[in-house]
Image (cartoon, rainbow, N blue to C red):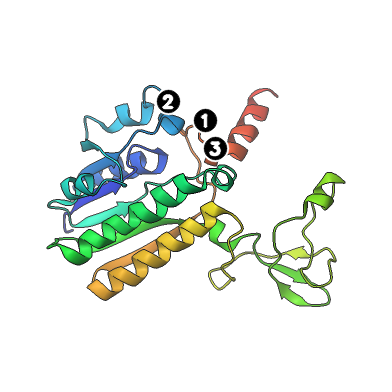
């Protein structure tokens, strides 16, 4: 099996730290770049302590061109996980989400396009959030893609999803890769943009690229303070309290 030099951005996070250890166990050389955001890591990152003696660590920010230049040197593969990830939070911290997720990704691609590079593949963490409310079936209109629930309905305790044409309740269907992309949050929009930027630019540069559309990834060691894990922290807290 070929051995690669792999850069993982956001690699001190939940997914990244587990991936870093898995790649190292397979004989790959791993570099992690992470800004150790207090919102995710608190005062001291337990996830970082798990990997800091196993991989090369760079404290860096994807919004910094110089940090990217340092981290990309000698790498074969980039796994781009670094992002702001709170769906609800993205609706009022719009500039920060666009700055980190979109501009940070654009800096990576600008360097790949304009400087000599050894990068052969880029993997980006996209999200199920690009599908918005998802895919449903209306008895009258067939397959439909509803918009976000209306405030007036939720205030009366009606959380059911409605057909965008006749406002009747609809049946939930599995969301597959052919489902319509129609994000309903700033976070979802930035993930769609990340995905399209990387797939489009890498294709033009002859670099392999893939986007993974994650949905509620969970497991041991996950942060319960990160807004992205909100629903899972609620579930686990209720379970622990009986």
Q: Based on the displayed image, in which of its 4 quarters is residue 167 positioned? A: bottom right
Circle 3 SS class: helix
Residue 25 picture quarter: top left
Residue 11 in view here? yes
Few, some or many residues within 10 Å of mark 1 (<14, 14–19, 20+)? some
Q: Position of residue 101 (x, y in %)?
A: 41, 52
Q: Position of residue 68 (x, y in %)?
A: 22, 49
Asked if the residues shown at circle 1 and circle 2 are in contact, with their CB atoms under 8 angstroms apart, the answer is yes
Q: How many marks?
A: 3
> Which numbered disc, 2 or 3, marks the residue that appears first in the sequence?
2
Residue at 59% across, 71% down: 180
Distance from disc 3 to disc 1, alpha carbons, whole Å, reads: 6 Å
Q: Which residue is identified by label 3? A: 227
At 40% from the left and 49% from the top, the residue drawn is 99
Q: Residues within 10 Å of mark 3 (few under 14, many from 20)?
A: some
Residue 93 as seen in the image, left or right of residue 115: right
Please give the residue where the numbered disc 1 appears in the rendered image.
225
Q: Determine whether 149 is above or below 216 in the image.
A: below
Asked if residue 93 is positioned above or below residue 111 in the image, the reply reads above
Q: Is residue 12 above or below residue 63?
A: above
**Left or right, residue 194 beside residue 118:** right
Precedes in sequence: disc 1 or disc 2: 2
Q: Give the alpha-carbon distance from disc 1 to disc 2, as whole Å.
A: 8 Å
User: Which mark, residue 42?
Assistant: 2
Taking depth in this image into account, of 208 and 92 the one nearest to the observer is 92
């Amino acid at each position: 099996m070929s051995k690669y030099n792999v850069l993982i951005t956001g690699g001190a996070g939940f997914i990244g730290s587990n991936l870093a250890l898995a790649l190292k166990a397979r004989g790959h050389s791993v570099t992690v770049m992470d800004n150790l955001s207090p919102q995710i890591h608190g005062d001291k990152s337990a996830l970082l302590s798990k990997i800091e003696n196993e991989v090369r660590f760079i404290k860096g920010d994807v919004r910094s061109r110089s940090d990217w230049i340092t981290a990309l040197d000698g790498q074969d593969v980039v796994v781009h996980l670094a992002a702001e990830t709170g769906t609800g939070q993205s609706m009022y911290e719009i500039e920060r989400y666009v700055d980190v997720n979109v501009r940070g990704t654009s800096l990576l691609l600008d360097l790949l396009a304009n400087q000599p590079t050894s990068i052969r593949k880029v993997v980006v963490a996209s999200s199920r959030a690009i599908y918005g409310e998802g895919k449903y079936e209306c008895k009258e209109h067939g397959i439909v893609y509803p918009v976000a629930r209306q405030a007036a309905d939720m205030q009366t305790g009606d959380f059911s999803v409605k057909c965008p044409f006749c406002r009747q309740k609809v049946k939930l269907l599995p969301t597959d890769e052919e489902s319509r992309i129609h994000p309903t949050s700033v976070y979802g929009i930035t993930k769609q943009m990340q995905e399209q930027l990387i797939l489009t630019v890498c294709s033009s540069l002859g670099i392999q690229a893939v986007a993974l559309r994650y949905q509620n990834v969970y497991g041991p060691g996950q942060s319960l303070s990160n807004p992205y894990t909100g629903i899972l922290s609620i579930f686990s807290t209720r379970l622990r309290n009986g």
